[in-house]
Amino acid sequence: MKYDCLLFDLDDTLYPLSSGISTECLRNIGDYMIERLGIDPRKVPDFCYLLYKNYGTTMAGLRAIGYKFNYDDYHSFLFNSFVHGRLPYEKLKPDPVLRHLLQSLPIRKVIFTNADKIHAVKVLKRLGLEDCFQGIICFETLNLQPSDSDQQSVVNGIFDIVGHFSRPNSGVELPKTPILCKPSVEAMEHALRIAGINPETTIFFDDSIRNIQSAKRVGLHTVLVGTSHRVKGADHALESIHNVKEAFPELLAENEKSDVIKHSGSVGLETSVSA
């Protein structure tokens, strides 16, 4: 198989889960729900679990069940507030091994993350990988900011998702979210169209089983990162992203055969496919 693109998830894929960034992010999401949306702190754990499980991200789930808020406020880096603004990015260190590996692969490399672009760029810079990718598909790529009239956090008619799952077979369907994100097949197909990526000649790396399985459904060649145990939907499983060479020796073989310019067709981080 001749591959012409490598598509990478960002968080917990290009750096290990053990960094603790995900744990801090979950805590910040809870703070946002309490401080901005007025959700009872006692309900936050169940909310986070059910929204993430059913919508891919807590943010997508919150919008689905009726909460209205400004997306930038949610992600906000202003005064270190909320979900990504408060993250301890100093826990992420440069990864020269991964940098060398990525630079040795002479094909297009693109990030595909549910996070916002500022977060993506910050992470890549902390890892020393900011010039290793030719594009970023991020939250802004797939989602428009709600209109001003739809950005109030105080709303009526919130769908009771906790009650919904405590009453099995209620016959009531879950509300749909206006947010596009992984693992939605629709989001993945839209992202590939925007970036001009052919799934049949692309390898997709992600730490989420759900994302991997959705990626397989849209025709991507899939690699589950963070475990050596291959699950349904994953063509390969890597304990670490550093093991790419062992899984795909043909990628490096291509490098040895050709002097192809590494960043042919590059659009760079600042003019990437993100909005």
Image: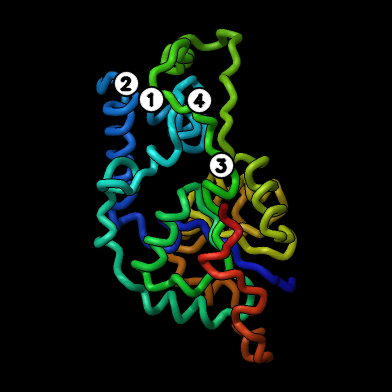
Q: Earlier in the sequence, mark 4 or mark 1?
A: 1
Left or right: where does residue 235 sit relative to residue 88? Answer: right
Q: How far, Cα to Cα, is label 1 from label 3?
A: 18 Å
Q: Earlier in the sequence, mark 2 or mark 4?
A: 2
Q: How far, Cα to Cα, is label 4 from label 1?
A: 22 Å
Badge 3 marks a residue whose secondary structure is loop
Q: Amino acid at mark 4?
A: Asp
Q: Which residue is mark 3?
A: 181
User: Which residue is located at x 53 percent, y 32 percent?
Assistant: 146
Task: Choose between 232 and 40: the one closer to the eye.
Answer: 40
Q: How far, Cα to Cα, is label 2 from label 3?
A: 23 Å
Mark 1 or 3, closer to the camera? 3
Query: Can residue 88 be seen here?
Result: yes
Mark 4 or 3, closer to the camera? 4
Q: Amino acid at mark 3?
A: Cys
Q: Earlier in the sequence, mark 2 or mark 3?
A: 2
Q: Which mark is residue 47?
A: 1
Q: Which residue is mark 2?
A: 39
The local crowd at label 2, few if under 14, some if 14 to 19, many if 20 or more residues have their Cα within 10 Å, is some
Which quarter of the figure is the N terminus placed in?
bottom right
